[in-house]
Image (tube, rainbow, N blue to C red):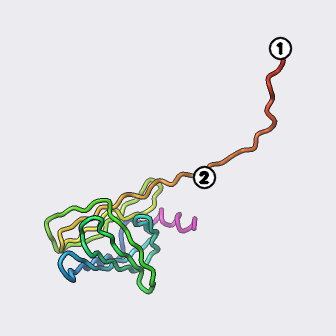
Amino acid sequence: MKSIRRSLLILTLAIGALGASVGAAYAQSAKGTFTLTHETRWGNVLLSPGVYSFSLQSPGLPAPIMVGKAGSSQIALVLPQSVSTERPTEDSKLVLRRDESGESFVSALYLGDLGVRLQFAPPKAQTPAAETAKLGPIAGPQPGK
């Protein structure tokens, strides 16, 4: 796992073939696919490299996004921190950033067709495990000489 994290630090922020082909199946819903070239955190979910699909039933809060890896039956639900409207465009994109430790995470999902931006909180800094050291005998107060 440590070697994966080390290689993650070396990888660039570019997403290989981001194919966020978003289509509105019906009003205010979206589906799309994207490809991750490196391990990326999205909310509390750690996604390995590969091809993924996502779906959004409604862009209103809480706006859960269902994310699944191609060939897997597992689905993750990710909640945005905020949802805002923008001018509709033809461009949709998944925005990745890196935290202080170099870990990649999803910071935003722009759904151009719907004119919606979903913003995601950065992962919480992980507190290192506490270390302890065994103490020797503790000397009591010395009687006055």
Which element type, helix, strand or loop, lies under badge 1? Answer: loop
Q: Position of residue 82 (x, y in %)?
A: 28, 60
Circle 1 or circle 2, nearest the eye:
1
Which element type, helix, strand or loop, lies under badge 2? Answer: loop
Q: Which residues are magenta?
A: 1-12
As drawn, the residue found furthest toward the bottom would be 71
Q: Which quarter of the image is occupied by the C terminus?
A: top right
Inspect the magenta stretch and tell me whether residue 27 lies in it: no
Inspect the magenta stretch and tell me whether residue 9 lies in it: yes
Decide if residue 65 is on the left or right side of residue 3.
left
Q: Quadrant of residue 65?
A: bottom left
Q: Position of residue 61 (x, y in %)?
A: 27, 64
Three-letter amino acid code of the residue under disc 2:
Ala
Three-letter amino acid code of the residue under disc 1:
Gly
Decide if residue 49 is on the left or right side of residue 127.
left
Crowdedness of circle 1 by 10 Å Cα count: few (<14), some, many (20+)? few
Crowdedness of circle 2 by 10 Å Cα count: few (<14), some, many (20+)? few
Magenta segment's dominant SS is: helix
Q: Quadrant of residue 25?
A: bottom left
Residue at (36%, 71%) from the top-left corner?
Answer: 15
**From the viewer's perspective, is residue 83 above or below residue 55?**
above
Marked residue nearer the N-terminal end (1 or 2):
2
